[in-house]
Amino acid sequence: MKVCLSMRNVLLLCVCLVCCWGCSMFKSAEKWYRGRINTVTHMDLTVQADEECAPKGFADAFVPIDTRLDMMGRELAAQDVYPRDEWFDAFVAEYPWIDSITAVNVHGEVLTSRGQGASLDVAPAEDKELVNYAALTHGDPLHRIPTAHILSGKGAEKRLALSMPFFKNNTWKGCLVVVFGFQKIVKFAASPDDIVILDASGASLWPGRYEGIMDAVAGQPWKEWLEDVVSGVFTVQDKEFFWLGRAFAGTWLIYTSERYK
């Protein structure tokens, strides 16, 4: 009974405070909640205009690619339970540039799959390389976030696999694995041939029209640079390039384009 009376007194006190202060208290609390706890994330895709500014047209090539990758990664990150069949279908329809999305158990055994060649345990690449799903389950189930993996294949341009763990009753049960290359997504760029995409290890993801010098571009000290900066300029065979690094699912994607003198 004493506990009930105590709770009742607390409620009466709250009512009195509301009557005295009005709704301003709630507005202040709401403002604090939005500003401190439930902050709204804003994506800054602008390129700084300084002495190392991006070449003209860089944003038109970079932004359409990067925003689509970011949207796909965010939707995948929100799915930490095994999805319904309708979710797989909607995912493929929303991101038609991916090769496939596959659900595997903790042993890498395929549970279901959608996309090109989804009925096979084979990635839909020209060389039909096998995807080692067992290796892709070694992601980050502790933090429940997607992890990017560079797939080793025979093609000149490597593909990415994005692995997202899913759970049942807080127990890790497997991963959702998205496999894609950049040949399709770069078509959203205004001038796909003018941009080069690689990761910090130098793996070529999209060479644009610079296949002849990709070894030199890939051989730049990317990891060393990225320790201090996320953009800069380098020179290969008298060609000056601007580069921009973007964090993506635990790795770096590097976008670079030629700056004409």
Image: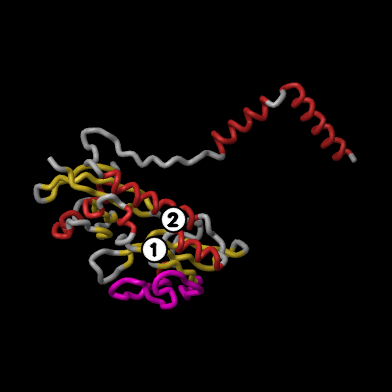
Q: Nearer the viewer, residue 107 or 197?
A: 197
Q: Amino acid at mark 1?
A: Ile
Disc 1 crowd rating (10 Å Cα; few below 14, some 14-19, many 20+) is many
Q: Residue at x 26, y 54 (%)?
A: 192
Q: Residue at x 17, y 56 (%)?
A: 210
Please tell me whether mark 2 sits on a helix, a strand or a loop.
Answer: helix
Examine the residues drawn in magenta and state their main secondary structure: loop
Q: Is residue 136 left or right of residue 203?
A: right
Please tell me whether mark 1 sits on a helix, a strand or a loop.
Answer: loop
Quadrant, the N terminus = top right
Measuring from the top left, give residue 166's x and y in whole percent.
53, 63
Is 81 within the magenta?
Answer: no
Is 111 within the magenta?
Answer: yes
Measuring from the top left, give residue 169's x and y in whole percent.
62, 63
Q: Nearer the viewer, residue 64 or 45?
A: 64
What span is in magenta?
105-134
N-terminal of the two: label 1 or label 2? 2
Q: Which residue is mark 2?
A: 72
Q: Residue at x 56, y 62 (%)?
A: 81
Up the image or down, 126 lies above or below 195; here it is below
In which quadrant of the rendered view does residue 242 lie? top left
Up the image or down, 223 lies above or below 23; here it is below
Q: Amino acid at mark 2?
A: Met
Quadrant, the C terminus = top left
Q: Is residue 238 left or right of residue 26?
A: left
Q: Residue at x 29, y 48 (%)?
A: 61
Residue 192 is tagged as none
Q: Which residue is mark 1?
A: 98
Q: Are marks 1 and 2 in contact (CB under 8 Å)?
A: yes
In which quadrant of the rendered view does residue 187 lie? bottom left
